[in-house]
Amino acid sequence: MERRVPSTASEEIQLYLQTVYSLLRSTTEVKIRTLEEIHAAMNSSLHPDARKTSPDISALVYTLLRLPDCMPHVKHVVLGQSASVYQNYGYGNVEKWEEVSARARRRRTYFDRKDTLACFIASRSDIEDVVPMLTAYQIEWNKLHILLQTVYDSIPWDELTEGTAAFDQLAEDLEMQPEDLARLKLIWGNEFISSLKQIAKHKCKLQIRLLGGSLTEYWRVTRNWLDNVTQYCPELHTRPIYFISSNPHSLVNLITGFALQHQEELVHYIRQAENAELLEEWQNIQTESVPSSQNNFLYYVFKKYVQSKAGKHLLKEQSKFERQHGITRVPSSKTAFDVEAQIIDLSKIDLSTVDPRLCEGSWDFLKKTDALLLNIDYPLGLSAYNILAKAAEHLGPIQGIYIMGKAASLNGVHGDVIIPTVVYDEHSQNTYMFRNALKANDVAPYLVYGTVLDNQKAVTVLGTFLQNARVMDVIYKESYTDIEMEAGPYLSAIYEMYRPKRHPTDEIVSLHRLPFDLGVLHYASDTPMSKGKNLGAGSLSYFGMDSTYASSLAVLKRIFHVERERTASLSKE
């Protein structure tokens, strides 16, 4: 019998969360300064040097990538579920403010071009993500502010080029290594000097306010999100559905093969673009000097190409091509949280254009199928529960659920694929055990750089900052090696899809007799047990495409297998 993992929430983290929610009950703004001491006391694995006077550059970089670039101008942060909630609290038409975004966190945010940032939240998990991030950002900003005060007048601003004595001296004055200052320069780009001057000019004094925050509001905004999706395809209410939580690019690329049809144009872009690494990788693939997948590489280049001025013309052609091949993209509403969806009609798949790796087995089922794939850009934390619960309530019969996303691995390396059969959920404190429809052999044939680790145990954590060394030690000692944020809430919703009651709490829960297919896999983007690798701080870049596409291929081939059997069974009736 599986032994339930002990509670992973340390006393420091529990106290931190209790303090956050008690303060946010206030009808006025709360100063982030109030949370700094208790934030530092958590000893977060993402912010281990919060108490030191020298900057914690890894924590600062993490927040800079997950907060919008307008943050130096922000004084007030307002959290709300929808445009109507903001309207009710006197923040009229926030969706008409300037829409801003972060590079590494998908959250709908608007800036009033003065000093206020409106963040749309989908669940409690967004609060537990935003508040620690703002606190870490303020702590590190103010460390740099103090250090810059003492040397500001002596800084040769015109000479701050990497590798120069002036650059190295500034790094020393700011109590960091030159490579750390270079990381900040890379993030800030042309704003490097102006950003440092702005930090020197004033302290960061953020204030935050939560509007509403009731469970009813989260349910309402989730229903509005689902209504927006079904408006694009009313047949979602009646036709068989395969629900997938992944990303907005890999499944579509594999099913349409659109990028592969433009190989010549993409190769021309590689040769013309000032990107020696891309060209070298392409040449190595052509000479078989490296074992990389040519198709995966072209998908990666295609994404970069259409974001460039030279490649934008393909976006319109791609959209038309996708519609002709049964793919409907559903952008998220600007008045609610940001989760894109795609609806894929299996009967309209064109075998002449799909990725060749999919072309195995009989495809006769395409003539008989009426099934749809609903693919959503994986949500954050508890919003996964809200979305799947609402989808199960209002959509057609669910034939399969497949959960694919990033995770931190405690026993693997970047690019590994982790397939769990046990998930401990910090939200419900349940240990879920289930039969995973995906196995190592389903992924391994398509994985070049990493390893597939199946029969693993995962922990769904409350937030990336809400972990410390004590928590990590408990997790690892109990042989939980996969740390992520969505599987637990999804499994709680799945429990309610076949049992006549709400999911339990603090129990061992068996999900072995589900009336539909279930597949869960994660690709390792971080290795927090490795030196210098903080949870959630990694970037997969091109090499992450290997595990992403290997996982996507496994999911699609599993769906095709299930649908072949379903249509064959219906034909016999």
Image (tube, rainbow, N blue to C red):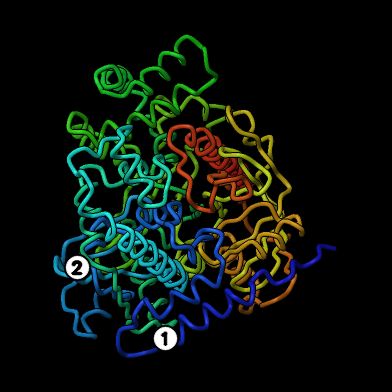
Within-10-Å neighbours for mark 1: few <14, some 14–19, many 20+? some
533 horizontally vs 347: left or right: right
> Whole-percent x and y of residue 115?
19, 70
Vertical placement of residue 460 versus 115, above or below:
above
Q: Residue at x 70, y 60 (%)?
A: 473
Within-10-Å neighbours for mark 2: few <14, some 14–19, many 20+? many
Q: Which residue is mark 1?
A: 23
Q: Residue at x 31, y 39 (%)?
A: 322
Look at label 2 and name its amino acid.
Glu
- Residue furthest bottom in the image: 27
Look at label 1 and name its amino acid.
Leu
- Could you say whether the residue bearing mark 1 is in a helix, strand or loop? helix
Q: Which residue is mark 2?
A: 95
Question: Could you say which is closer to the camera, residue 314 or residue 417?
Answer: 417
Question: Could you say which is closer to the camera, residue 76 or residue 463?
Answer: 76
Q: Quadrant of the N terminus?
A: bottom right
Q: Residue at x 66, y 60 (%)?
A: 472
Q: Earlier in the sequence, mark 2 or mark 1?
A: 1
> Whole-percent x and y of residue 461?
58, 64
Q: Quadrant of residue 541?
A: top left
Question: Could you say which is closer to the camera, residue 139 or residue 505?
Answer: 139
Q: Residue at x 64, y 36 (%)?
A: 442
Q: Which mark is residue 289?
A: none
